[in-house]
Image (tube, rainbow, N blue to C red):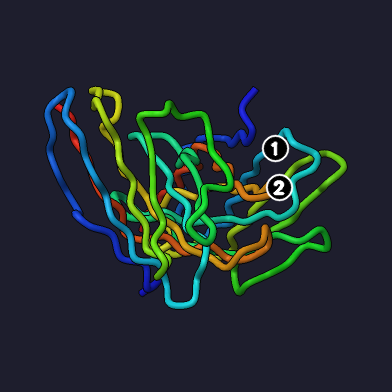
Amino acid sequence: ETGVTQSPTHLIKTRGQQVTLRCSSQSGHNTVSWYQQALGQGPQFIFQYYREEENGRGNFPPRFSGLQFPNYSSELNVNALELDDSALYLCASSLEGPGNTIYFGEGSWLTVV
Amino acid sequence: RKEVEQDPGPFNVPEGATVAFNCTYSNSASQSFFWYRQDCRKEPKLLMSVYSSGNEDGRFTAQLNRASQYISLLIRDSKLSDSATYLCVVNTDYKLSFGAGTTVTVRA
């Protein structure tokens, strides 16, 4: 499909725990963005990584952090999970630049209980 | 004020009908614009980019009015497979801003 793969696809965590979500970008894409989509809402921008550096961040607290690796794959880490963190987490890859098409992975469904 | 606001619908239309809906965006510096389609519990997928001159892709027509900061999507000859949520998306620098989506249901 899009060539963007995410893991795990579904997971359940307890409030206060930590979670790591992973994303492999489409071949050749150097930019990875993460989005949170709560039920009934549009995706909300968390942050973006370009060449292993964070180069933009949305309105999310510091307990949301990330990494991008030399092969452009990425991780999203969330500490001290809260019930409201339950959502679909989407990774998107693209080439750098505002006009370039962004391709989403199938997402990771996180439930916090 | 939300960065992107959409009519949530739902729009419930018969097969073959024309359905149109729109969104507005708040940042006049936004650079590029898209419609994405999202099926239930799936990831968003690019439907089409939106240009000021207006553009068509088969049965889909998109329009952008920069002066009014308004984007529209029209679907002609609706098919059952067009049933989905349509997300209005605005790109400002590095960041995509999504509307909450417009739900369209096409009935037989």
Q: Residue furthest right?
A: B67
How far apart in space, not on screen, are marks 1 and 2 (Cα)? 8 Å
**How many numbered discs?**
2
Measured from the top left, where is residue B61 in percent x and y? Answer: 67, 63
Relative placement, left or right, of B56 versus A17 is: right
Q: For this view, does A102 lie left or right of residue A40? A: right
User: Which quadrant of the figure contains the N terminus of chain B?
Assistant: top right
Question: Residue drawn 18% across and 30% down?
Answer: A112
Q: Nearer the viewer, residue B22 or A27?
A: A27
Q: SS class of the residue under badge 2?
A: strand
Q: Report which quarter residue B107 is drawn in.
A: bottom left
Q: Is residue A24 above or below residue A43?
A: below
Query: Is circle 1 on the same chain as circle 2?
Result: yes
Q: Secondary structure at mark 1?
A: strand
The residue identified by callout 2 is: B71
Q: Is residue A75 above or below residue B6?
A: below
Residue B61 makes an appearance in the image? no
The chain letter under disc 2 is: B
Q: What residue sits right under mark 1 in the picture?
A: B25
**Which chain does tag 1 point to?**
B
- A91 and B3: which is toward the camera: A91
Task: Give the quarter of the image for residue B68.
Answer: top right
Q: Residue at x 65, y 43 (%)?
A: B22
**Residue at the spot 28% in from the left edge and 59% down from the top edge:** A6
